[in-house]
């Protein structure tokens, strides 16, 4: 069970990295004053977030303990960043944007999959 959860958490991290890095090419825009993901290849944060997702996914597949800790810290930080923006821009007249919600759901899913102690114990290298 723990091995399956680790693989699902690694897939979640890889999906996050793909959304961040591919999203810079596709340019997710919703128009108007809607909340959007706006990352550019010129921003170092885009590279840090994307590469962190790739490194965490690779490390979890190899069962490295540092990858578990890095993934937990990165997911919690990103959930805080996206959550604070969503709370700050809450509106009852229009629905929230899809892409920030998707990132928040991915980070929450990662935390739920990787948090149990038996999952951490399976990362023993």
Image (tube, helix red, strand yellow):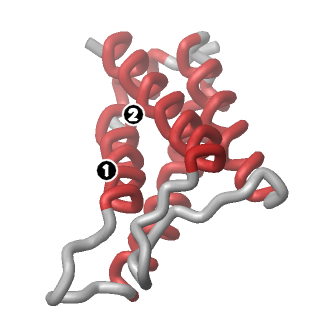
* Residue placed under numbered mark 2 in the picture: 114
Name the residue at 52% across, 62% down: 37
Please state which of residues 118 and 108 is positioned toward the viewer in this rendering.
Answer: 108
Residue occupying the far left of the picture: 92
Secondary structure type for disc 2: helix
Q: Earlier in the sequence, mark 1 or mark 2?
A: 1
Q: In this view of the protein, which residue sits in the foreground, 90 or 28? A: 28
Q: Dot 1 surroundings within 10 Å: few (below 14), some, or many (20 or more)? A: some
Residue shown at 31%/50% (left/top)? 105
Q: Quadrant of residue 2?
A: top left
Residue 65, image x, y percentages: 61, 26
Q: Are marks 1 and 2 in contact (CB under 8 Å)?
A: no
* Numbered disc 1: secondary structure: helix
In percent of width and height, residue 31 lies at: 43, 73
Q: Residue at x 51, y 41 (%)?
A: 19
Give percent across and percent down for residue 38.
59, 64
Query: What distance separates the C-alpha of mark 1 from that of mark 2?
Result: 14 Å
Rendered location of residue 106, percent (x, y): 37, 44
Q: Is residue 81 left or right of residue 58?
A: left
* Disc 1: which residue: 105
- For this view, does 74 lie left or right of residue 104? right
């Amino acid at each position: 069970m723990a091995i399956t959860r680790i693989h699902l958490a690694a897939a979640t991290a890889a999906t996050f990295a793909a959304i961040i890095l591919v999203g810079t090419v596709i340019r997710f825009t919703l128009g108007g004053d809607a909340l959007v993901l706006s990352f550019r290849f010129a921003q170092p944060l885009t590279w840090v977030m994307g590469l962190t997702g790739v490194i965490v996914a690779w490390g979890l597949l190899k069962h490295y303990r540092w990858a578990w800790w890095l993934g937990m810290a990165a997911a919690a930080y990103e959930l805080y960043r996206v959550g604070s923006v969503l709370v700050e821009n809450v509106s009852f007249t229009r629905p929230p944007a899809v892409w920030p919600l998707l990132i928040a759901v991915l980070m929450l899913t990662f935390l739920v999959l990787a948090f149990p102690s038996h999952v951490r114990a399976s990362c023993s290298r």
